[in-house]
Amino acid sequence: MQLETERLVLRKPDREDVDGYVEMWSDPEVVRFIGGKTGGPKEAADAIERMLRHWDRHGIGLFTVVRKEDERMIGRTGFLLWDPERWISALREELDGPLESEIGWTFARAFWNRGYATEAALACRDFALGELGKTRLVSLIAFGNDPSVRVAEKIGESLERENLPGEFRRRVDLYSLGKRPAR
C-alpha cells in the first residue's frame, strides 16, 4: 500500500529501510520528543519489525516517507492504534476493543521546516477520513514539541486533553480531529 503527494511517496516500511531509520534515529534532536533514545541498526530493525506487525494485525500502520525527487527516505508518518483508556500503543502489545487512530510523524532533521511533515500528515488525514471511513483522528504530542503542534493544527486538530496517563515518561498532550465516541 502507498500514498502519494506532490513531493512524497508514503509506503509500507521495508526491512531494507534500516539505514534510513538509523540515520534518522541516531540524531538526539529527532528522538527528543519520541522517547529520547537514539538507536543503531539493531534498534531500527526491531522497530521496522514492530511496524510491520502492526500492519499485519491492523491492516494499517506507519509509512516510510520517500522524497520523489531523489527517492531518499526522509521520515515516517502514518497510523498507530491506541487503547484510549490506558493509552498503550498497539506497537507495544496486542490490543482489543475500540481503539483511537493516531496520525504521527517523525522526519530526519535535514528535512525539517520544508513542509514535508504537514504534506505527509494531510495525505494520511485525507486517506483516513476518506478511504478508511474514520470520523476521528488523534495525535499524541510531547509537551514542548511546538513544530508538531503546528503540524497537528494545520491538519485540523486541536488540543483536547493535557497530560495523558499511560506509557509515557513525560507530559504528552492529545490533539484531535472529530468527536470522541460515547463509551
Image (spheres, rainbow, N blue to C red):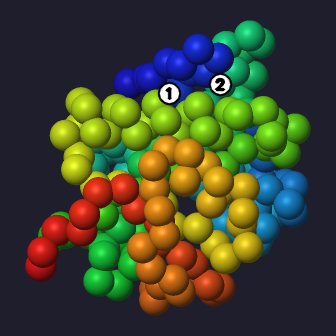
Q: Amino acid at mark 1?
A: Arg
Q: Amino acid at mark 2?
A: Val
Disc on res. 56: none
Residue that badge 2 annotates: 66
Instruction: Choose top left, top right, bottom left or bottom right for residue 99.
Output: bottom left
Q: Position of residue 112 (x, y in %)?
A: 80, 42
Q: How many marks?
A: 2
Task: Say what secondary structure mark 2 lies in.
Answer: strand
The reply to whether discs 2 and 1 touch (Cβ–Cβ < 8 Å) is: yes
Dividing the image into 4 quarters, which one contains the N terminus? Answer: top left
Q: Is residue 91 visible?
A: no
Disc 2 crowd rating (10 Å Cα; few below 14, some 14-19, many 20+) is many
State left or right for residue 140 relative to residue 19: left
Depicted 5 relative to depicted 168: above or below? above
Q: Nearer the viewer, residue 14 or 140?
A: 140
Between the residue at mark 2 and the residue at mark 1, the CA separation in whole angstroms equals 8 Å
Depicted 5 relative to depicted 119: above or below? above
**Residue located 24% across and 30% down the image:** 131
Q: Nearer the viewer, residue 140 or 167?
A: 140
Lower sequence index among marks 2 and 1: 1
Depicted 16 relative to depicted 6: above or below? below
Residue that badge 1 annotates: 11
**Residue located 72% across and 44% down the image:** 107
Q: Nearer the viewer, residue 160 or 27?
A: 160
